[in-house]
């Protein structure tokens, strides 16, 4: 989609005296003022607002989305994941400025920020649609928890040196019974995260697919499985009372689950739109982040 950008919302992770974040935001705000763009601020930028004594009202995520043409997230992948989940239903495009470590999602460095913003304001960018997962935890027929995930939904142990038992169903068809440390249900976006470290495949970000990746399975023939993203995945926790389990969403939200609980995972209807620089190259990012083609 082509967007007319006049008002830009800013989300950032500002804690204490974080000079890098504050300096990046100030550099961005100063540039946008020169371009006669309006800037609105998320409540997460409160520390920056106080530091620079900016006279403005802080907005919650809903207000920010409704007033912005583009939201810029300053921080790492964790900050970006939180922003995606809270803004997914508003059809607002997101742009990430990387102040974290890996930066698979936030792919613009502060040094290149102004150059890329100039291109984006002139309509020269890549708009990439990606999907999220939505999950429900069902106990005795009642929904006890609901959450979205941009990377992954993970069912895992809470105890040390224990395994959990669970059954997996896809579109109401039984797939398998497993004893393992857990299971990662991942989007293509999340295939470079926990799923990858558990031995899962890399999925191109635009694929309509999800991967089911066992975590340290007791039976080595339980291998990662890739299915259509329009499938309904259901995980039923086994009846063992000797272990306790959790389900986590993007590693940021967690709920305890009990024997016989069902975790139902489906593709969320609303997509998120990621804005990339015009020269965005997915494989170049993989090469850089995963150190492919490096000589030993």
Image (cartoon, rainbow, N blue to C red):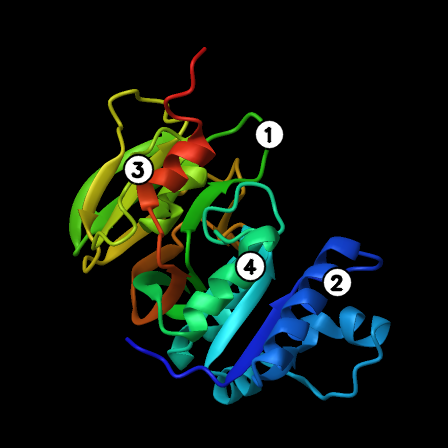
Image quadrant of residue 168? top left
Q: Residue 294: x percent and y percent?
A: 42, 20
Screen quadrant of the N terminus: bottom left
Image quadrant of residue 201? top left
Question: Which residue is labeled 2 in the image?
Answer: 22
First-in-chain label (4 vs 1) = 4
| Residue 84 visible to an observer of this rendering | no
- Per the rendering, the mark at residue 160 is 1
| Residue 170 visible to an observer of this rendering | yes
Q: Residues within 10 Å of mark 2 (few under 14, many from 20)?
A: many
Q: Residues within 10 Å of mark 4 (few under 14, many from 20)?
A: some
Question: Which residue is labeled 3 in the image?
Answer: 202
First-in-chain label (2 vs 4) = 2
Q: Which numbered disc, 2 or 4, marks the residue closer to the eye?
A: 4
Question: Which residue is labeled 4 in the image?
Answer: 113
Q: CA distance from mark 2 to mark 4?
A: 14 Å
**Is 276 in front, or is 222?**
276
**Is 229 in front, or is 175?**
229
Task: Identify whether 72 is placed above or below 226.
Answer: below
Screen quadrant of the C terminus: top left
Image quadrant of residue 19? bottom right
Q: Residue 65: x percent and y percent?
A: 50, 82
Q: Which numbered disc, 4 or 3, marks the residue closer to the eye?
A: 4
Q: Residue 58: x percent and y percent?
A: 70, 83
Q: CA distance from mark 4 to mark 1?
A: 44 Å
Q: CA distance from mark 2 to mark 1?
A: 40 Å
Q: CA distance from mark 3 to mark 1?
A: 28 Å
Q: Residues within 10 Å of mark 3 (few under 14, many from 20)?
A: some
Q: Of helix, strand and loop, which one carries label 3? A: loop
Task: Identify whether 5 is placed above or below 212.
Answer: below
């Amino acid at each position: 989609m082509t967007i007319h950008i006049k008002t830009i919302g800013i989300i950032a992770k500002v804690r204490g005296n974080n000079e890098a974040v504050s300096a990046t935001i100030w550099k961005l705000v100063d540039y946008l003022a020169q371009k006669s763009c309006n800037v609105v601020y998320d409540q997460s930028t409160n520390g920056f607002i106080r530091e620079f004594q900016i006279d403005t009202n802080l907005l919650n995520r809903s207000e920010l989305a409704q007033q912005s043409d583009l939201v810029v997230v300053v921080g790492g992948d964790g900050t970006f994941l939180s922003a995606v989940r809270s803004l997914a239903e508003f059809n607002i495009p997101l742009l990430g400025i990387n102040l974290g470590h890996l930066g698979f999602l936030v792919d613009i460095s502060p040094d290149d920020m102004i150059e890329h913003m100039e291109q984006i304001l002139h309509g020269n960018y890549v708009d990439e649609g990606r999907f999220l997962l939505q999950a429900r935890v069902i106990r005795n027929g009642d929904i006890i928890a609901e959450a979205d995930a941009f990377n992954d939904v993970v069912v895992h142990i809470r105890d040390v040196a224990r395994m959990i038992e669970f059954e997996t169903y896809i579109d109401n068809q039984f797939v398998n019974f497993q004893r393992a440390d857990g299971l990662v249900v991942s989007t293509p976006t999340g295939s470079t995260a926990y799923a990858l470290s558990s031995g899962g495949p890399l999925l191109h970000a635009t694929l309509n697919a999800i991967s089911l990746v066992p975590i340290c399975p007791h039976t080595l023939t339980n291998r990662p499985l890739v299915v259509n993203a329009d499938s309904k995945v259901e995980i039923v926790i086994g009846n063992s009372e000797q272990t306790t389990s959790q389900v986590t969403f993007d590693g940021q939200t967690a709920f305890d689950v009990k024997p016989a609980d069902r975790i139902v995972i489906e593709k969320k209807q609303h997509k998120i739109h990621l804005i990339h620089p015009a020269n965005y190259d997915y494989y170049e990012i993989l090469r850089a982040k995963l150190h492919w083609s490096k000589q030993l």
